[in-house]
Image: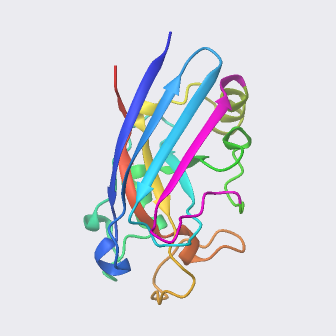
Amino acid sequence: MVKKYVAAITSLNGDKIGTHPTGEATFTVDDETLMVEITMDHTSPNTQHWMHFHGFPDGKDAQPATIAQDTNGDGYVDLAETEPVSGTTMVPFNDKPEKMDIPTDTYPTSDANGHFHYKKEVPLAEISHKFKEVFNDDDLHLEKRVIYIHGVPESMELPDTIQGAVGKYDQHTTLPIAVGKIKSAD
């Protein structure tokens, strides 16, 4: 049985970063694969964009963050501020989502116009096994997740109040720039 999910992706932090990214993600699940396709426009040009679905391991329904989540009042919604409504980072959309290695340099890079297209066929058995290992559940529960697109150029001035460093990657890499709720298309 094939199940399809979609997310309309809209801007987050657009007024601060000077661009309002938009896009769409589709997730098609059959007995063997998870096909992920993400198209984005109006992102920061020539920038690598981390992308993930976020959610709650306990099954709570994740929601997209809005400016209301800017708890420190700096005008930005950073990665840490998304967690109360969106949960934790779960599955990356990089070269090997099934490995669930979040901090890598294998995410898509936008072109000079801020456009990119990502398409990946993920072995369902592998991603389900890894998801169970990490989150104690082998069902991805896509209908309870949100997708985030992250990343602005290193040259962009950002306040020190933005949280979200992951290893060697600073807030330029992890700043959320767009978000969408994943919904069943069936």
Q: Is residue 144 magenta?
A: no
In this picture, is 38 found above or below 12? above
Near-viewer residue (12 or 133): 12
Residue 143 visible in this rendered orientation of the protein = yes
In this picture, is 140 found above or below 72? above
Q: Is residue 75 left or right of residue 143?
A: left
Q: Is residue 124 magenta?
A: yes
Which image quadrant for residue 12? Answer: bottom left
The stretch in magenta equals 106-125
Residue at the image point whose x is 41% and y is 50% from the top: 86
Image position, residue 170 (x, y; %): 61, 77
Residue found at the very far left of the displayed protein: 68
Which image quadrant for residue 5? Answer: top left
Count of numbered circles on the image: 0
Which image quadrant for residue 155? Answer: bottom right
Residue at the image point whose x is 59% and y is 28% from the top: 34
Image position, residue 69 (x, y; %): 31, 65
Residue at the image point whose x is 71% and y is 34% from the top: 130
> What scheme was used to colour the molecule?
rainbow
Residue 61 visible in this rendered orientation of the protein = no
Near-viewer residue (179 or 78): 179
In this picture, is 136 found above or below 118? above
Give the quarter of the figure containing the C terminus: top left
Image position, residue 16 (x, y; %): 33, 80
In this picture, is 149 found above or below 32? below
Q: Is residue 29 left or right of residue 23?
A: right
Image position, residue 39 (x, y; %): 45, 49
Residue found at the very far top of the displayed protein: 1
Residue at the image point whose x is 38% and y is 65% from the top: 42
